[in-house]
Each structure stands twice: as C-alpha cells, then as structure tokens.
Amino acid sequence: MYALALIRYRRPIEDVLKHNPAHREYLQELKRQGLLVCSGPLEPRFGGAALLRVPDDQAPEILDRIRDNDPYVKHRVAQYEIQVWNVATGRDELDRI
C-alpha cells in the first residue's frame, strides 16, 4: 500500500531547521527499511511531502509509527497529514522502484 504524507511546519522555519539533521537521518532510516520511496521540502518552504510504501496488513500501525517517531513531531515543530493512496496509473513503474 502507498500513502502520501504531507508534513506541515507548525513553528517558524528557524525552529524547524534546528531539528532538520535528525529529521533527515530519520528519513534515511525509513528509506533503508523500504518504507520511504521519496521525500523533500515543498516550495515555498512551509513543509514537506513523502511517498511511503507499507505492507497492507500492517498499514495503520506502521503509518502511525512513522508519524510519531519523526523528530519534527517529537519536538512539536511539524504535524503529519497521511492519506492512503490507491495508485492507478503508473503503479507498475512505482512498484519497481
């Protein structure tokens, strides 16, 4: 199953950037685990987005854990909005990534 995570900053960018190294390290770990397909900041810089791939049978628990363990969330500088995404067009190519 795929999900889109919209990460919205809730504090001034200066506060967010203090936690950016830990956030990026966290995302790299999600990538190593095969849970993160891609991610990056939005422009203008009010947050970021991530494309997640999680096992269907554990999706709610894993998505909650991904959100709750992000240093941005732990330090209350951002919040997640996660939407499950039923990819129709391009699913085969996405699955090969």
Image: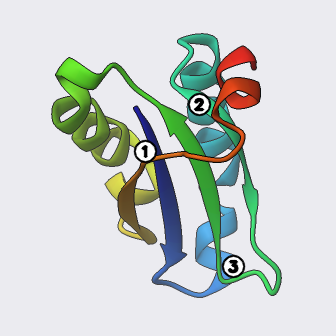
> Residue 3, how many percent across, how many down?
44, 46
What quarter of the picture does the N terminus occupy? top left
> Residue 80, how many percent across, how many down?
39, 64
Residue at the location (61% across, 34% down)? Answer: 27
Q: Residue furthest front?
A: 89
Q: Is residue 96 left or right of residue 23?
A: right
* Classed neighbour count for the residue bearing mark 3: other residues with Cα under 10 Å, few (<14), some (14–19), many (≥20): few
Q: Depth-wise, is mark 2 or mark 3 nearer the camera?
A: 2
Q: Earlier in the sequence, mark 1 or mark 3?
A: 3
Q: Earlier in the sequence, mark 2 or mark 1?
A: 2
Secondary-structure class at tag 3: helix
Is there CB contact under 8 Å for labels 1 and 3? no
Q: Depth-wise, is mark 1 or mark 3 nearer the camera?
A: 1
> Residue 65, how many percent across, how many down?
26, 35
Disc 3: which residue: 14
What amino acid is labelled 2 in the image? Leu
Q: Is residue 44 left or right of residue 56?
A: right
Closer to the camera in the image, 11 or 95: 95
What amino acid is labelled 1 in the image? Asp
